[in-house]
Image (tube, coloured by chain):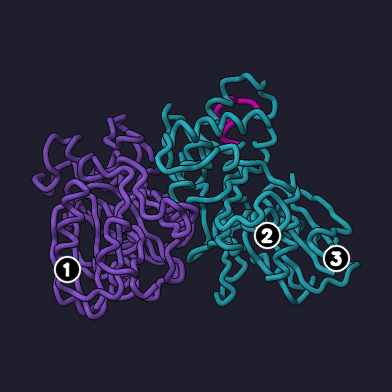
Chain colours: A cyan, B purple
Amino acid sequence: MIGGIELGGTKCVLAVAESPDNILIKKIISTKDPNSTFSEIISFFKDYEIESLGIGSFGPIVLDSKSKDYGIIVAESKEGWNGVNVVKNLSNICSQIILDTDVNAAAYGEYNYGSGRKCKTLVYVTIGTGIGAGILVKGKSHIGNFHLEIGHMQIPNLDNSKGVCRSHGNCWEGLASGPAMKSRWNIEASKLGKRHVAWEKEAELIAFGLVNIISNHSPDKIILGGGVMKQKHLLPMIRKNVELLWNNYIPLGSVSNLIIEPGLGLDSGIIGSLELTKN
Amino acid sequence: MIGGIELGGTKCVLAVAESPDNILIKKIISTKDPNSTFSEIISFFKDYEIESLGIGSFGPIVLDSKSKDYGIIVAESKEGWNGVNVVKNLSNICSQIILDTDVNAAAYGEYNYGSGRKCKTLVYVTIGTGIGAGILVKGKSHIGNFHLEIGHMQIPNLDNSKGVCRSHGNCWEGLASGPAMKSRWNIEASKLGKRHVAWEKEAELIAFGLVNIISNHSPDKIILGGGVMKQKHLLPMIRKNVELLWNNYIPLGSVSNLIIEPGLGLDSGIIGSLELTKN
């Protein structure tokens, strides 16, 4: 039996499975303070014999297993979590733990079982409480020296609005995440009507970041997930903005083939976390 | 004997060598219209028995050797060159030609012989007539589906100035390349005094792009080359801006170790083009 944990900043998905595409039990809990979250996770797994555990965690988190800081979250991206060691706190569940970022895990899920199959260069972007991206090149995560933090790119801020990122203010996440929308329009994004001008603005802001991802990675596919993308009318608006901005500079093919929905719906992250056990 | 061609948008460097670090003859010519440029290149090589030829070319250019368009420049990034096949036009020099972008070639040069040795993730950025970057992951160029076009990222344009990119106006290259500086200040950048406010602005604009590269690749080193970087006072100003913008979000170590000069001076590109013959 294998275990999977998708540890997000808002919610945490837990699963016990025979294989990534055969989940036996799944549970979703809220991500609270570290101690109570870890207790709840450990309690979920205690009745199962887990041979290998894959964790896709929010970050920034140290992925280098040779580092003395392996598994530690290194910024206050979620209150109370700076300095917390995710791997050590979960080491009682089983001895073999494989860690990656939550977005890399989602990319692994889509690459192996979803809409990113056979992509040489695959990008999975989540746009929700935060913005992040996992990138696989020939099926392996591109993490560089630490790991990617694509949500913290600098993008145009045409109306000089005040972003919400604690570290950077007006970075991509600061301007285009769910909380940024709430701050800009004084209402939860999910409560805005489809024709509200907010979606035009949001599509433009997301497109700025996607153009930068295209410039930096020339991907085969960009899969857009996360809470904000539950608004189905947003995807075609984003595609249109990317097309206009990119202005056919290098051939992208059809943007409808390039920028797509997850094939696994909301399960990319947990299926990918389970898939990590194969690494 | 091996041959190398660094085909830039402004100048073209030609070399005959025993190995990349043992160049026998080198010549620099201006890049003019395709026909006269190719004639001059072919004439340079005609007296030598070249076994293998490495070409680092400006782009956008088709790198996929299986494509029917292999070797073709696909945009009017330089007047008169859209649709020109670089490889076919040089195929008389020798039968074995290895093509990559000019910036990837420069990155190979620095990785093998310069200041990028042993870097798992190495970025070489040129800031000159255009802006581009070559990225090596474990010593192999990261080209994605087509190749990277990092100069065409969307970055903040705080003073709403008019960029010079033919395709995008205000992209990174449009705002921060050499021609962009000339357009902004009505004078060649090289004639501006060191204390001119232009350099503060330039450092800020370059830093926006570098922060995006850090967000997208988490590199071990970023090597800055190209004509604009000949202004030695600019490098420390760029580092300071990157440090301020990044705000210590994930540990970068010392920016003086992260953002550096080429170890090979102006020869990164030609040495790297010769190195391509080993691929």
Reading the chain from its start, which is encountered first: label 2 or label 3?
3
Q: Nearer the viewer, mark 1 or mark 2?
A: 1
Q: Residue at x 69, y 29 (%)?
A: A190
Amino acid, disc 2: Gly
Label 2, on which residue? A56
Which quadrant would the N terminus of chain A be assigned to in this image? bottom right
Q: Secondary structure at mark 3?
A: strand
Q: Is residue B183 above or below residue B212?
A: above
Which callout, 2 or 3, points to the residue nearer the camera?
Answer: 3
Q: Is residue B130 magenta?
A: no
Q: Give the amino acid at mark 3.
A: Glu
Residue A95 is left or right of residue B30, and the answer is right
Q: Quadrant of residue A49?
A: bottom right
**Residue A54 percent location from the top left of the image:** 72, 65
Say whether marks 3 and 1 touch (CB < 8 Å): no
The CA distance from mark 3 to mark 1 is 65 Å
Question: Mark 1 near mark 2, Cβ–Cβ under 8 Å?
Answer: no
Cα separation, mark 2 vs mark 3, equals 18 Å
CA gap, disc 1 to disc 2? 57 Å
Badge 1 marks a residue whose secondary structure is loop
Residue B200 is situated, as x and y percent measured from the top left of the image, at: 23, 45
Region of the chain picked out in magenta, as a range = A179-188
* Discs 1 and 2 share one subunit: no
In the image, farthest residue toward the right: A47
Q: What residue is shown with label 3?
A: A18
Which quarter shows the C terminus of chain A? bottom right
**Viewer can see residue B272:** no
Q: Are marks 2 and 3 in contact (CB under 8 Å)?
A: no
Q: Main secondary structure of the magenta part?
A: helix
> Tag 2's secondary structure?
strand
Q: Amino acid at mark 1?
A: Lys
